[in-house]
Image (cartoon, rainbow, N blue to C red):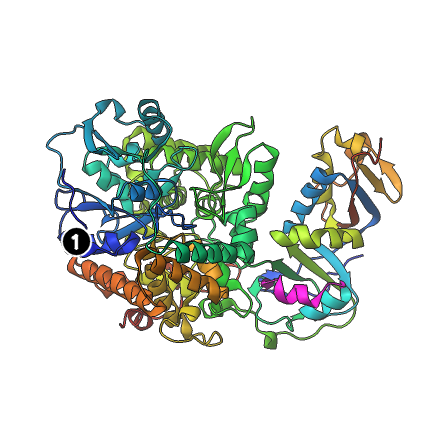
Amino acid sequence: MAFCENSADKVGQPAPCITVASGTLVLLLPAQYFQRLLALLQQGFWLRVPAAGSIETLFCHSWGLSPVYLASRIQTIFLNGQPVDSVAALVGDRDTLALSAAMPGLVGATFRKGGVCAPLRAGITHRNETRSPATGPCWVQVKLFNLLCQELGPHFLARGIWWPQGLVLTFLQGLPAVFWTVGQVFLDGRPLDAPAVARLPWHQGTELVGVTGRLCSEAAVS
Amino acid sequence: MRTEPVGDYAGLGGRAMTTTVVALEVPPSCHPLGAANKLVIAPGLLSGSLAAMSGRLSVGCKSPLTGGIKESNAGGQPAQVLARLGYAAIVLEGKPPDDTLYKIVINKDGVNFIPDNSLKMLGNYDVVARMQQEFGDKIACISIGPAGEMKLGAASIACTDMELRPTRHCGRGGVGAVMGSKGVKVIVLDDSGLDLRRAKDPEKFREANRQFVAGLKKHPITGEALPAYGTNVLANIVNEAGAYPTNNFSTGRFAGVHNISGETAAELEKARGGLATHGCHRGCTIRCSGIYHDKSHNYLTKQPEYETVWAHGANCGIDDMDAVAMLDRLDDDFGLDTIEMGATIGVAMEAGLIRFGDAEGAINLLKEVGKGSYLGRILGSGAAVAGKVFGVERVPVVKNQALPAYDPRAVQGIGVTYATSPMGADHTAGYAVATNLLKVGGDVDPLKPEGQVELSRNLQIATAALDSTGMCLFVAFALLDQPETFQALIDMINAFYGLSMTADDVMALGKKVLKLERDFNRRAGFSKEQDRLPDFFKKEILPPHNVTFTVTDEELDAVFNF
């Protein structure tokens, strides 16, 4: 399934072409491997949403997260690389939304949404007037940085996300032999082991594969 | 050697002390490596006491890199120990008659100058190890590496951390070269037998410190983000903003950022038995540093800072965290400013000495500096010199000092500070983000783009004020959001000295410091023409936002209107 017909400009970059592969991967990971998975969320993952909407709408309604958390904890938001001052900003098809907790440094304060130092980056600030709302289902790329990886990552992984096959394969192939005695991986309900992972034809694949991930105890397999 | 009462400099600490002494006692036209220059080393107002976050050490002089006044500061143990020894500042002046190298030992019994040519051209790690063998492990050291002895423009002054490693550096402006020109390799500080400095009103001081620490701990930046990931937590968001200078400032995004981000480094540190959360001096409650182990799980260096990871990473197209950590280790050992060296290697890559992304080549170039080869001495003189020697136009410097890790085309207001700071391009010159709370110059409307110049001015004043207390700049975030934490800081200073200062008094000090610095530079021959970014920032568009630096010269000239 491809979504390449629209090449809307994303701040100097073409909108990504999205192709979805068949199959869903389920990962049950002990804590140390789950942490590794969470660290991948900084590189971004894709979500399918029923319709375009504001950051607030997506966050609180589509993804079921708390408005209080959005207001207080998520201090820095980028939409297609542009710092955002209002959660009313519209998110459209194939947009990239990057979320961060409060950041240090002058530049951290500068990127903070609605902060006193916002004028320092006025030239790249997101402005809603340049956006037209999209209709129909959308793909949105989400990046979670720093504390939000830990706090929101488990929520999104439990609900299911989409990742490029190549990224998932690199993660699976980087797991040590001992992992396969304490964690579990299923593809469309069938368990995979290390040799089966090695046979997956996903090398450098950019097609998106559905992934869910959950924390399990080390005794899950044994 | 002489010890003098503090006299008219009473009540000054940190940057206020170093700037005032340099401005009043150093002839602005002197050669920075000559006898007339002075190297002033000063702890903060509350260093040596129980006050949290009070361990910054300021170093000031006329800079051999910029030709103007310089204040550079670092964490580590020396500020605490120097203050406990009872000194408000060390001033190195004059010039030795020959090339004898000295160590200076300061303890409760006094000060000793000891010739020690066996230390010549030793790296900072070896120097400190030698001092530890000789004087025990209760000391703190201020030292220079080979770069300082060679009087290179990128030479730093190292301060030891809690583990007695030379990992905290007064990096900017070539201050290490001035220490080298005085013939001093290392200053050994030993406060054995001495107590903490005591406040005039101990009860009030203790309560204010308690409030101050509570404020830092409850704030999401100082209580969570910095301890968890260190300063390099910024890499991902600055990259996302398209403001992460990559391949010598040719683009604002680095594809390999996730390999060198704070999040990745923290995981690596924990997996290898290092530490992702660690303080650089006793009394630090934020603990934004860490300990980085190599692939064999052996100590390599402290957690590389954001600026270092950027300078040696994205700016050189290198996405190998172990290579960046090795470059950080070599910088610390040779006594070099990581920002200046990263920028210089980026310029060398632009010139074609090695290709962008060549981590091994970058390590070899840095080793040339440590060896003192002709090539190494050129590189160790900084990005401006390297750009001239190798014929590169895109040289990211202001007043000959390399720009830090934020592209001023994407974050134009920071470009205003880079251009106009008396220090040369300096990310910490406009760092004290609590300006609205402090009401410096009145409130700024965040929705007005023209507020950039006004904000830069206010930030520079507030930062000069905070630098003058000798507190770690990272306390600024809790001050920004929590008025009670700011009040606790003022209360601490007042209780310690028996004063009744207000925020206005602190800001007045910041203004005074900046005026002294600007005046020194004017007398040294600087004019508004030096308050400019390099031309390429106005001409070359920066992807992905495709922006140039658009703040006008007239607007830049309006920054210092007080």
Quadrant in the picture for the C terminus of chain B: bottom left
Quadrant in the picture for the N terminus of chain B: top left
**A71 relative position to B22: left or right:** right
Amino acid beneath label 1:
Gly
The image quadrant of residue B4 is: top left
Residue that badge 1 annotates:
B7
Q: Which residues are magenta?
A: A63-78
Q: Number of numbered discs present?
A: 1
* Residue A75 on the magenta span: yes
Q: Residues within 10 Å of mark 1 (few under 14, many from 20)?
A: few
- Residue B282: x and y, percent? 43, 42
Observer-nearest of B166 and B197: B197
Measuring 57% from the left and 70% from the top, which residue is drawn there? A85
Observer-nearest of A137 and B306: B306
Observer-nearest of B90 and A54: B90
- Residue B222: x and y, percent? 51, 54
Vertical placement of A208 versus B488: above or below? above
Give the letter of the chain under mark 1: B
Regarding mark 1 in the picture, which secondary structure is present there? helix
